Amino acid sequence: MSFSSPFPEVDIPTASVYDYLFSGLAGPDAEHLDRIALIDSTTGRQTSYREMVGRIDSFAGALAARGLGVGDVVGLLAPNSSAFAVAFHGILRSGATATTINALFTAKDIAKQLTDSRAALLITVSALAAQAAEAVELVGLPAENLVVLDGAGRAADGHPNAVELLDGNAAAPEVTFAPSSHLAALPYSSGTTGNPKGVMLTHRNLVANVAQIRPLHGMVPDDVVLAVLPFFHIYGMTVLLNAALHARARLVIMPSFDLAKFLGNIAEHRATIAFIAPPVAVALAKHPMVDEHDLSSLKVVMSGAAPLDAELGRAVAERLDCRVVQGYGMSELSPVSHITPFDAGAHDMHVDAPLSSVGWTVSNAVSKIVDPETGKDINPPDEGLSATGELWFKGPNVMAGYLNNDEATRSTVDDDGWLHTGDLAQVDAHGCVYIVDRLKELIKYKGYQVPPAELEAVLLGHPGIADAAVIGVTNDEGEEVPKAYVVKQADTDLTEDEVIEFVAGQVAPYKKVRKVQFIDAIPKSASGKILRKDLRTA
């Protein structure tokens, strides 16, 4: 039995991303043109909405002057900055498709994505120019097809910079396409459970997801949003960049996470909203540096990208004296499918979503929980929590498919339009969804299912543990058992036996950690997901 979104239906206009986000600035939102849209935290440079849209139009015109537009793919390899925001929306405004590339990629990784996406041009910055140039050479693109926005220029290294790209002062082109089918973005899945795949997201997908989440976020022009999650990842792209700009809020942009700078930017810019991943929550809950900053402006912290343990969330909320909520999504869902409103649900639902849940199904969409063994629907309960099953979702934000991979598309989105998330979940009587773990990451111990995320939450409750991850490994008897990788707090004397005993005191016997390895850092993706495949090869 499926369960629909409890939130009111929203209007999803038939519009391009550019028109949806920015056309209002020429009409009813003109009063916001001179508001600050973007602040580069490293330089202090401020960009107004008027200047930002002008730069986007100029960027689109420059791409069109190079013959790029509908049907072309442009790669974008850069950390967060106002330049990223302009380049990304300039690509979409030109009618081309943006394939955003992880700023941590090696040259071979970059080349692989350029080849798979058939990108005709790569845009980057000088800090990443070396690997970008090597990647362009590997795929056979000419040097002039690598634009280094802050580079020395074509005469120095063969790569045009932003000044040279925009030199012609070309006007933004008139483009025509169907938003429902034309690809706006082509991010690649994280690859935590397999080879990365190009996720085809249309203009309608991205427009729909902003429309679905905006009323629930409740962001307003006076909000100051700290933007540290990478824009190249769909979480940062939609939830930060697009949704905040649609709200006419102010984005304080950080190129990467650094705790001292993160806290300093909240204090200096009086940030009201921070979007994070669970690793940042660990620091906010445990690091002594937090007490050195005035964070009183912060109203809401929203966590996503991976499950947030309720105890950890409560610790952050209590320490920062703000509301902590979480949501759920994936690249294939543009990305948000479930969300806890910034008021926790008080206005629409007249009940607060438990912090352990990811909230309710977004507007204009439906969900269901399916038993992975039998394929039968698991009904929402009259009280308490349902049985555990795979979370399925259907809505206008579901991807168009995987690029050049019909088999993977068919295995993920069925003939009825249901996207099979691969995540195990439960639902309560109010329709709140609770993520248990990845279906493929469950540890099978003596026939019992052990969710790694549950054990990780227990481990993080130990005062001597700074971070932790759990995977299944094979013991000497050939059985799969839970193994914990643990990062100790500084100056903490913690033994393997103490970790095992701590966990054993809080879980059922079959869930006990059987092995422990101390390491310096837990490998994670830029969006905050634990890279379990890296632990398996460590």
Image (spheres, rainbow, N blue to C red):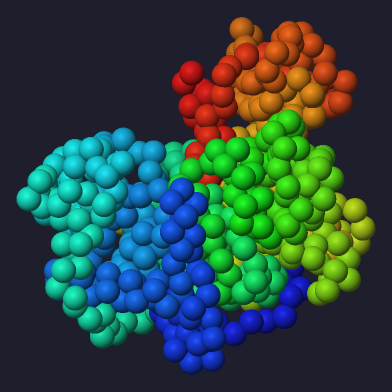
Rendered residue at 82%/59% (across/down) = 353
Residue 209 in view, yes or no: no
In this rendered view, identify the residue nearer to me: 248 or 68: 248
Task: Please tell me in which quadrant of the rendered image residue 211 appears.
Answer: bottom right
Image label count: 0
Give the left or right position of residue 312, taking residue 100 as reference: right
Give the left or right position of residue 46, taking residue 96 as reference: right
Location of residue 184 in the rendering, given as x and y in whole percent from the top left corner: 37, 68
Rendered residue at 90%/53% (across/down) = 384
Residue 190 in view, yes or no: yes
Rendered residue at 72%/80% (across/down) = 8
Task: Please tell me in which quadrant of the rendered image residue 214 appears.
Answer: bottom right
Location of residue 328 in the rendering, given as x and y in whole percent from the top left corner: 64, 55
In this rendered view, identify the residue nearer to me: 48 or 427: 48
Give the left or right position of residue 430, taking residue 52 as reference: right
Task: Please tell me in which quadrant of the rendered image residue 512 appears.
Answer: top right
Location of residue 439 in the rendering, given as x and y in whole percent from the top left corner: 62, 42
In this rendered view, identify the residue nearer to me: 305 or 393: 305
Q: Which residue is outermost to the left? A: 155
Location of residue 205 in the rendering, given as x and y in whole percent from the top left corner: 48, 71
The quadrant in which the N terminus is found is bottom right
